[in-house]
Amino acid sequence: RKEVEQDPGPFNVPEGATVAFNCTYSNSASQSFFWYRQDCRKEPKLLMSVYSSGNEDGRFTAQLNRASQYISLLIRDSKLSDSATYLCVVYGDSGYALNFGKGTSLLVTP
Amino acid sequence: NAGVTQTPKFQVLKTGQSMTLQCAQDMNHNSMYWYRQDPGMGLRLIYYSASEGTTDKGEVPNGYNVSRLNKREFSLRLESAAPSQTSVYFCASSDEGINYGYTFGSGTRLTVV
């Protein structure tokens, strides 16, 4: 049983589209939540933290619903450069370290 | 800023050979981690070190050993490589506050034949 679940996709969207990714986690005691971005054959990089009040960074909006144990990432006005795998990450599921979902693949096309 | 540096970037081993993957960070982080990433499996924690002098097992520690040599360096050793250890290995470090997330190295692509 994986503690962080994501739809693997791929999501194929045209430039300018809005796309949303969802993630669920199993441990209600989880404390911190993140979205990471991973480009092909590269290391994961922190995209944004996810706060209970929701947070926005430019075209990216992250939401957390603790009651439903659900995290979302919304990307508006998609760019070709947004093509990557997006990893949902939770802290508090497995001791001291972060617990990564398997990722959702996004391809933005011209 | 170097961040987290991993060596080597690529390695091919024969079954039964040993090797050590090196990781160093220059951000004065207390915590360091080793993950492996396989297709369809995502990132899985092998070992972590919450502080200098301490190490703990993660989700998939079998076949690996680690050493936290000092605050900067955290190495991963394969004593007798097996084809099942073919993977991409990432080292990461983090500061005290977990809300800052991790900084990852660029990875080591290991093939065991």
Image (cartoon, coloured by chain):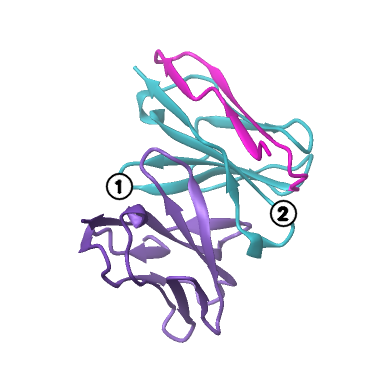
Chain colours: A purple, B cyan
Tell whether A97 sits left or right of B81: right
On the same chain, marks 1 and 2? The answer is yes
Dot 1 or dot 2: first in sequence order is 1
- Whole-angstrom CA distance, mark 1 to mark 2, is 29 Å
Q: Secondary structure at mark 2?
A: loop
The C terminus of chain B - image quarter: top left
Residue A102 visible within the image: no
Tell whether A110 sits left or right of B44: left
Residue B31, percent from left and from top: 70, 48
Residue at mark 2: B95
Quarter of the image where one finds residue B15: top left
Residue B38, percent from left and from top: 36, 40
Residue B25, percent from left and from top: 69, 38
Give the residue type at disc 2.
Asp
Residue at mark 1: B40
Asked if B80 appears above or below B46 in the picture, the reply is: above
Q: Which residues are magenta?
A: B1-30
Asked if A14 appears above or below B29 in the picture, the reply is: below
Q: Is residue B19 magenta?
A: yes
